[in-house]
Image (cartoon, rainbow, N blue to C red):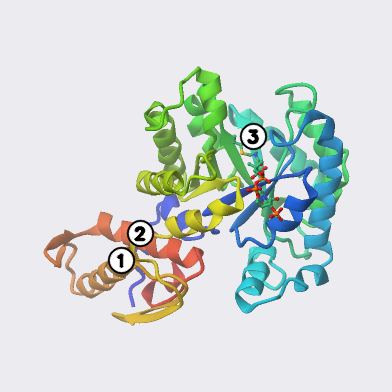
Amino acid sequence: RVAPFSSANSPAVQRISDIRPRRALFYVPGSDERKLHKSITLGADCIVYDLEDSVAFNKKGTARKMVIDALEVCIIVPKIPRAFAISKNLSDRLWLRLGLEYDDLNVVAIVIPKVQSAKDVQFVVRMIDSVAPESTEADIRQFSFITSRHEGCLDEPLVVRRCYANSRLHTTLMSHASRHNIRLIPSIESGLGIINLREIASADPRVDALIFAAEDYCADLGLIRTPSRTEMLYARQAVVTAASAFGLQAIDLVCLDFQNQAILEEECREGREFGFMGKQAIHPNQVEIIQKTFLPDPAAVCDEVTVTMLGFSFIGNHMNSDIERAAKIIEGYELHSQKGVGAFNLDGKMIDLPVVKWASKVLARAKAAGLTISGATSSG
Ligand code: 1VU
C-alpha cells in the first residue's frame, strides 16, 4: 500500500502523526491529598499536578512534598498502581497512563505557565540540560506537572529555578528522565505571549503543545468574559494556528463552570471545531465529556465496537462518522493515486490532497486516543 502522505513531509504532518493523547489535561491541586489520590482513577489522558495558581502561597512547600510523594508512588513504586487494577478497563487506562508496561510512553511533560517569549522556554531548557542526563535507560512515566512562578515573588524566573533545582521533585524527575524525553508545554496567558507565539512554538524541539489559558489572558488584557467567548476568538485561533504551523498540539481553555455539562459540551464542540486537540479540565466531571469530544466527531460515539470497513479495522471504545469518512477518503486516495489520479469523487464531493491530509490527521488522532487502527494508516 502507498502510505498516505508519505511524500508530504511537512513537519506538521510528521509531528501530528506522532501525537500523544492529551485530550483532557486534568489539573489537580498539589496541596490536596484526597484529589491527588483520586486523580489517577479518572482515566484522564494527562494529569497536571499543579504547584501554581491552585495552591495557596503558604502551602507551596507542603504541596511540593505532596506532589513528589504522589509521583514517587506512581513512578518509583510500580507495584502500588497495580493495586488499582480493579477492572480490566481501569487497569488498561492506568497501565497506559502510568506507562508501567509501555516503553513508548516514557515521557515527562512540563507545563510552563505564563510564557511570554522564547526566553521563558529556553530558561527551562537550560535548567533541564544542566541537570538531566544525556540519556538514560530508566523508563519514564507520562506525567505533566506545573512549575511555580508565584512563590512569593511574581513572575520571577529564579523562582522557577528554586522550586525545581533545590527540591526532591527535581531529583525525582531528573534522575528518571533523559533531557531528550522531557517534553515542554508552554502556556500562553498574555498579550505578549500571543504576539510572540511563533518564537515560543519554535523555541525548542522539545516543545510539544501550546496551552491557551483564558483567565490570565483576560486579566492581562482587561477583557470582559462573555458567554459567547468572542472576546478570546483571536487569541484562541492564533494559538491553534501557531501550533499547527509548528506541528504542535493546541490545548483549549478551562471551563470554569464545572457543574454545567451543557456549557462544557458547547465549549468542547467549539474548541474541536477551531482545531484544538484537547482541553484543560479542573473537575472529574469534565474528563469524560472532554475526552469523548476530542475524539473526531463526538456525534456518534458508541461503546465497545469492533468495526472492519474498507480494509480498515477499528477496535476500541469509540467509533464515529468522522473516522469512518476519514477511512473512506484514505482508501479512495490510495486506490486513485495508484492509478495516477489526484482528485476524485467520493459520495458526490471532490477529494484531493488537502482533504486527504485532514483525513490522515483524523485517523492519527483516533489512534492516539486509543483506537487500534490497522490498514494503510497504521504507520501514520
Ligand atoms: O468524592 P470525593 O470527596 O472523593 O472527591 C471529590 C473531590 O475531591 C474530587 N475532585 C478532584 N479530584 C482530583 N482532581 C480534581 N481537580 C478534583 N476536583 C474535585 O471529586 C469529588 C467531587 O468534588 P466536588 O464536586 O465536591 O468539588 P470540590 O468542591 O471538591 O472541588 C471543586 C474545585 C473546583 C475546587 C476542584 O475541582 C479543583 O480544585 N479543581 C482544580 C483547580 C486547579 O487545579 N486550578 C488550577 C488550574 S486551572 C486554571 O488555572 C485556570 C483558571
Q: Please, which residue is most extreme toward the top here?
A: 222
Looking at the rendered structure, the kind of residue marked 3 is Pro
| Secondary structure category for the residue under label 3 | strand
Distance in Å between CA atoms under marks 1 and 2? 7 Å
Q: Is residue 250 visible?
A: yes
Q: Are marks 1 and 2 in contact (CB under 8 Å)?
A: yes
Residue 113's label in the rendered image is 3
Instruction: Judge from the rendering whether residue 52 lies leftward or rightward of residue 346; answer left or right.
Output: right
Q: Is residue 134 visible?
A: no
Give residue 203's position: percent from left, percent from top. 58, 37
Q: Please, which residue is most extreme toward the left here?
A: 348
Q: In terms of depth relative to the viewer, which is nearer, 294 or 36?
A: 36
Q: Are marks 3 and 1 in contact (CB under 8 Å)?
A: no
Q: Earlier in the sequence, mark 1 or mark 2?
A: 2
Q: Earlier in the sequence, mark 3 or mark 2?
A: 3
Q: Quadrant of the N terminus?
A: bottom left
Give residue 155's position: percent from left, percent from top. 70, 23
| Secondary structure category for the residue under label 2 | loop
Q: Which residue was labeled with disc 1?
A: 321
Distance in Å between CA atoms under marks 3 and 1? 36 Å
Please tell me whether residue 346 is drawn above or below residue 188 in the rendered image.
below
In this view, the mark in front (3 or 2): 2
Instruction: Judge from the rendering whether residue 139 lies leftward or rightward of residue 231; answer left or right.
Output: right
